Image: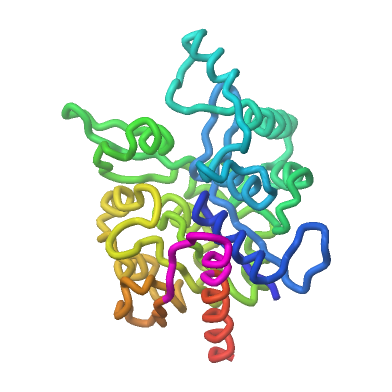
């Protein structure tokens, strides 16, 4: 079985861990199933001369056993000596903290990029260490960065998504969210091929605007997905985000914070099936099969059960499609 999962950070990574468990995929062991993860790179940022890819790293660390389980991002058993020394020098920005172990990843990535390797090759090399048990591919080798247009004190300005999200906690109302470079970007090698060959595509409960939305913004990816069987998992339960501040992102693009509205935002040309929580049972979306299941990934079993429900629905829909 060949599964493709376009994914953002924490929610996507945890869903993938459940999907691996339900498929019995163990790194280093033969399996009849494969998972290709198309990772969001719109959150990427250059800090202190280092290229940081938060979503790629969160997937890699989570599936490779190096994540901070408490935070859901960054390395386990982390220290922050480098951050403290940078602050002592008065270096900016002071709102984004890179851990010492994490810095090593960014140094390796930045050196390889400077040597001319594309991000897809760099990511593959980093995964040689972490052995995540999936094929992790960035959505594009081209540089795409998500920026947020805000108004403050009567003036409009654009912030990098990370500054808006981390420094301002998404509390500055966003007038628009823009993927800078997305129009010129092309899918990374293997992305479109994986989608064409997939038995199913699963959209995890990642942010629909700045995670999944960024991936869909790369030319050719949405069109390829529209030809596949796609089942998504709602990131909204009972009118509130499962995690994070997706509601602020949805408001910026004029979409209501509800399971129904997010599915309609994706649209029936993209979605074949949509999993909503039992709190949203009764949700109807024209042209999309909606199924209610418990969506909280409260532990390994609940997460694996969720992944199995999404996969079962996708395979059922594929069988009906013929």
Q: Is residue 49 above or below residue 190?
A: above
Quadrant of image for the N terminus: bottom right
Residue sitting at 70 percent across and 57 percent down? 135
On whether residue 182 falls in the magenta region, the answer is no
Q: Is residue 105 above or below residue 222?
A: above
On whether residue 298 falls in the magenta region, the answer is yes
Q: Quadrant of residue 85?
A: top right
Q: Is residue 100 above or below residue 208?
A: above
| Percent position of residue 43, x then y | 49, 42
Q: Quadrant of residue 18?
A: bottom right
Name the residue nearer the viewer: 154 or 91.
91
| Percent position of residue 218, x then y | 51, 54
Name the residue nearer the viewer: 246 or 320.
246
Residue sitting at 46 percent across and 56 percent down? 206
Region in magenta: 293-306
| Percent position of residue 39, x then y | 58, 52
Residue sitting at 31 percent across and 72 percent down? 280
Residue 227 appears in the picture as rendered: no
Residue sitting at 30 percent across and 52 percent down? 247
Instruction: Say whether residue 118 is left or right of residue 262.
Output: right
């Amino acid at each position: 079985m060949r599964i493709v999962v376009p994914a953002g950070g924490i929610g996507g990574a945890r869903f993938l861990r459940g999907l691996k468990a339900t498929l019995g995929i163990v790194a280093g062991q033969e399996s009849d199933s494969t998972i290709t993860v198309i990772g969001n790179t719109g959150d990427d940022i250059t800090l202190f001369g280092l290229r940081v890819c938060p979503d790629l790293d969160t997937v890699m660390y989570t599936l490779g056993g190096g994540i901070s389980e408490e935070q859901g991002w960054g390395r386990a058993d982390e220290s922050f000596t480098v951050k403290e020394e940078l602050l002592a020098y008065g270096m900016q920005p002071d709102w984004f903290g890179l851990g010492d172990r994490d810095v090593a990843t960014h140094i390796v990535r930045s050196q390889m990029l400077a040597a001319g390797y594309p991000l897809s090759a760099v990511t593959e090399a980093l995964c040689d260490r972490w052995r995540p048990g999936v094929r992790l591919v960035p959505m594009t080798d081209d540089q795409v960065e998500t920026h947020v247009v805000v108004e403050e004190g009567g003036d409009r300005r654009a912030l990098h998504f990370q500054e808006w999200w981390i420094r301002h906690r998404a509390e500055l109302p966003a007038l628009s969210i823009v993927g800078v470079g997305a129009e010129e970007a092309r899918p990374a090698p293997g992305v479109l091929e994986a989608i064409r060959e997939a038995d199913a595509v699963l959209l995890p409960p990642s942010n629909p605007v700045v995670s999944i939305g960024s991936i869909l913004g790369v030319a050719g990816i949405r069109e390829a997905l529209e030809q596949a069987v796609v089942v998504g998992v709602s990131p909204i339960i009972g009118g509130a985000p499962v995690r994070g501040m997706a509601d602020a992102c949805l408001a910026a693009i004029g979409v209501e914070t509800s399971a129904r509205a997010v599915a309609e935002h994706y649209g029936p040309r993209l979605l074949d099936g949509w999993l909503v929580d039992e709190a949203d049972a009764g949700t109807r979306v024209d042209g999309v099969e909606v199924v209610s299941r418990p969506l909280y990934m409260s532990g390994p079993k609940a997460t694996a059960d969720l992944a199995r429900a999404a996969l079962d629905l996708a395979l059922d829909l594929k069988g009906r499609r013929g």
